[in-house]
Amino acid sequence: MSTAGAVESTSRALPEYRQPTRRNTELVLLIAALFVGGFALVSVDLAILSQVQPATIVTLVVMSALLLIAHIMVRLTIPYADPVMLPVVAALNLLGVAMIHRLDLAEQLRAERVGSATPTPDLPSQLTWTGLGVALFVAVVLVVRDHRRLARFTYTALFIGLLLLILPLLPVIGTTVNGATLWVRAAGFSFQPAELAKIALTIFFAGYLVVTRDSLALVRSKFLGLEFPRGRDLGPLIVAWLISLGVLVFERDLGTSLLFFGLFVSMLYVATQRRSWLVLGTFLFVVGATLSYFAFGHVRVRVQVWIDPFADSADSGYQIVQSLFGLANGGLLGAGLGQGYPQLVPFAKTDFIMAAFGEELGLAGVMAMLMLYAILIERGMRTGIACRDAFGTLLATGLSLVLALQVFVVIGGVTRLIPLTGLTTPFLSYGGSSLVANWMVLALLMRMSHASRSPDPVLTPVVRPASVEPAV
């Protein structure tokens, strides 16, 4: 047989391999997430009202439509994206909607008992913000065709991030809520610019570290067995430290300050693989925390409440004390959706929504929700590892670290592991700023996941006809 004939017969025998997109898997997981969210919403209505409200059915239809739109967009534009991220986010968002609905009902029943005006429910607003978040998810997926192009806007992202941090300090539009200057109000709407700033600054950190990571990894001396960088390479870390202190001083926002500084130090370590950056970052954090404790009264109050919340349980420690009582009431399996008293915790829809879940779903429910966060963060980290470019690796890692740090800080504050910081729980808490920004983070992670999981273009081999073999 000739060589050409052998190649032709082999190509006929081998079937063409096509990498699966796993979109059907994503659809099945989305249906499971809708089932979990729908069960939670119906359980709340049955427990409190003994019937399912028409508004609950409308909520499920709206959420189903929004998630279907997101799924169709993923299927059409980024078919090789991770199939787990979107269903996990959908489950968290739906559970958050269910708890906000449950707290709305508690407020309405309380108003009826005391004879006051019925408060406006927050569920419609949360659904509106979810719709906007899905719309921006679609927009980011369509606009950011190649995540590597974001590296061109490294210093533009820095400028935008710093501008967003400064906006709440401007007169007229800046607003102080509960002692923290975090909000911008205009035309009847309010927004927290720091939520978008975390995306812009993560893009800057990734672009900056791609260029400078080699020089940042150079060492000149050893101290106590650790290799420390050169003095001039400490500049970026000092600047990040000063920016974090500036947020703490002028905006009185402990959570955002901790988030940004922790993000930069973590990305420094990922980029350079030098433990000395973690040591220096920890040292600067301790110095900054000590200075803040003695210089600012609001920091000192939070630390004192953290150490002994029962010393002033009727005033400054009331929130964390009610949270601890609610968690204790929930126990292992919880009181059941609609069966507890999460409305007794101040800001249960925002800062302390995990305390509400802890009371009604118990430790088991909280651990299940933390597992969802762990899956989402692990998938984001895996996307960073699989990226074929250094910028994508750092960007995906940074965005995953943003979610990880935010969850740690929030859960740590609610459970009294660390002092309260005032951050919201991603995808769960009421509020448009965090919800919209986190849907955009999801879009970037899935776009990078598609790029890393897409099959390489297969080149068809050109087989030249072989010469005729001589007869034996």
Image: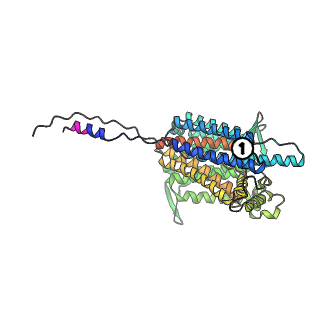
User: How does the figure colour the protein chain or chains?
Assistant: rainbow
The stretch drawn in magenta includes residue 5:
yes
Compared across the picture, whether 230 is left or right of 61 comes to left
Q: Return the x and y of residue 190 as percentages of the image width and height.
A: 75, 39
- Disc 1 is placed on an element classified as loop
- Name the image quarter holding the C terminus: top left
Quarter in which the N terminus is drawn: top left
Name the side, left or right, on which 430 lies relative to 67: right
Residue 349: in sight, yes or no? no
Spot the residue most to the left. Answer: 472
Residue placed at 84% from the left, 42% from the top?
A: 118
Residue 437: image quadrant is top right
Which residue corresponds to mark 1? 431
Task: Establish if 243 lies above or below 137.
Answer: below
Give x and y (percent) for residue 13.
30, 41
Q: Quadrant of residue 19?
A: top left
Q: Position of residue 277 (x, y in %)?
A: 56, 56
Image coords of residue 208 (percent x, y): 54, 45
- Kindly identify the amino acid type of the residue bearing the numbered disc 1: Gly
What is the magenta range?
Answer: 1-7
